[in-house]
Amino acid sequence: MKTRNWVTAAVAVMGMAATSMASAQQPKDLVLAISEGTSGGTDHGRVVAKYGGLANLIGDAIKRRVVVVFVREFTALEDGMKTGRFDFVMARPSDYPARGMRNYGYSYVAHAKPDGQCLIVVPKTSAIQTLADAKGKRWVLPEKAAYMSKFCTAELRDQGIDLENEKVTYVREQATIGQYLQGGFADVGGVASYSGLARDWQKAGHPVLHRSVAQPYFPLIAGKRIDAKQVEAVQKQLVAIEDSPTGADVLKSVGVAGFDTGGRQKLGELLAWIEKD
């Protein structure tokens, strides 16, 4: 009897050990971190539902399970890239994925279509006709630390306008830029091409004085645990989704027109362009 109990116990222990070993051999879920910038009114559950289809497509491409994690704070996004906690990162503004590549060993995978631009806008009642006419006028831009403000500043620098020598008001919300312009509190403003304000501004017939160079929008990057073959497999999957019904649903859910896989060099050079004196 005692022997039988010992054998039963031994079998149980061996079974537990086998289960533990099988569990250890199972690959861990990969993490897709999503940052939508300063966009409010969302939560983890909504983001998981919004990007779950994209995570599944990425996972199908590399035969791994990919789970979505919503990252609200930029400090948490930066820390997650620095420590390598995130296997994939899809984030806006684009300077964060660019830093992931430059500082933390991430690889470019793709970015959303269309590319992003800084639009220099004026109200339709304005007498300003050219960018040169805007020199010396009252400017309004997103807060100085914001990516789009840096984007517009770099573009204007290349066009011969140094905002350090201009009268500039920086505001927290892009919608406020439209209010400043239409209320007569500013003469010319800089906005993101992908913002609601830019869309509504043009729809209302207000002029776009100048469009900047295009830069990658909402990039997707991959961490060190994702090898080159896996990156290539994901790229093929993302390019192909525009031609499939399932892919169309994913694009609609994420809110982009498609994915471009040709922006590695541009994203790699983005920070140097923004930071150039």
Image (cartoon, helix red, strand yellow):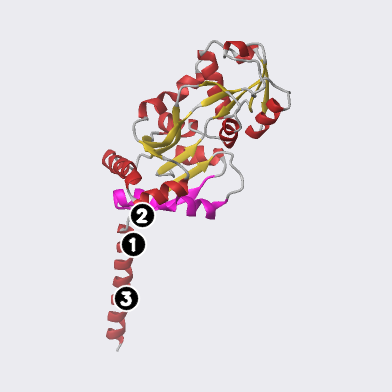
Residue 53 is a magenta residue = yes
Residue 30 seen in render: no
Residue at mark 2 to residue at mark 1: CA–CA distance: 15 Å
User: Residue 15 occupies which quadrant of the picture?
Assistant: bottom left
Residue 208 seen in render: yes
Q: Which residues are magenta?
A: 43-71
Q: Residue at x 35, y 52 (%)?
A: 245
Discs 3/2, front? 2
In the rendered image, residue 46, in percent from the top left (x then y), is placed at 53, 53
Do the residues under discs 3 and 1 have CB atoms within 8 angstroms? no
Q: Residues within 10 Å of mark 2 (few under 14, many from 20)?
A: some
Amino acid carrying mark 2 in the image: Arg
183, 103: nearer the viewer:
183
Q: Residues within 10 Å of mark 1 (few under 14, many from 20)?
A: few
Main secondary structure along the magenta-highlighted residues:
helix
User: Residue 171 occupies which quadrant of the picture?
Assistant: top right
Residue 212 is a magenta residue = no
Residue matched to label 3: 12
Discs 2/1, front? 2
Q: Residue at x 32, y 53 (%)?
A: 64
Amino acid carrying mark 1 in the image: Ser
In the rendered image, residue 193, in percent from the top left (x then y), is placed at 52, 30
Relative vertical location of residue 248 with respect to residue 213 in this rendering, above or below: below
In the rendered image, residue 254, in percent from the top left (x then y), is placed at 46, 46
Q: Is residue 154 left or right of residue 15?
A: right
Do the residues under discs 3 and 2 have CB atoms within 8 angstroms? no
Badge 3 or badge 2: first in the primary sequence: 3
Badge 2 or badge 1: first in the primary sequence: 1
Q: Is residue 147 left or right of residue 266?
A: right
Residue matched to label 1: 23
Classify mark 3: helix, strand or loop.
helix
- The disc at residue 65 is 2
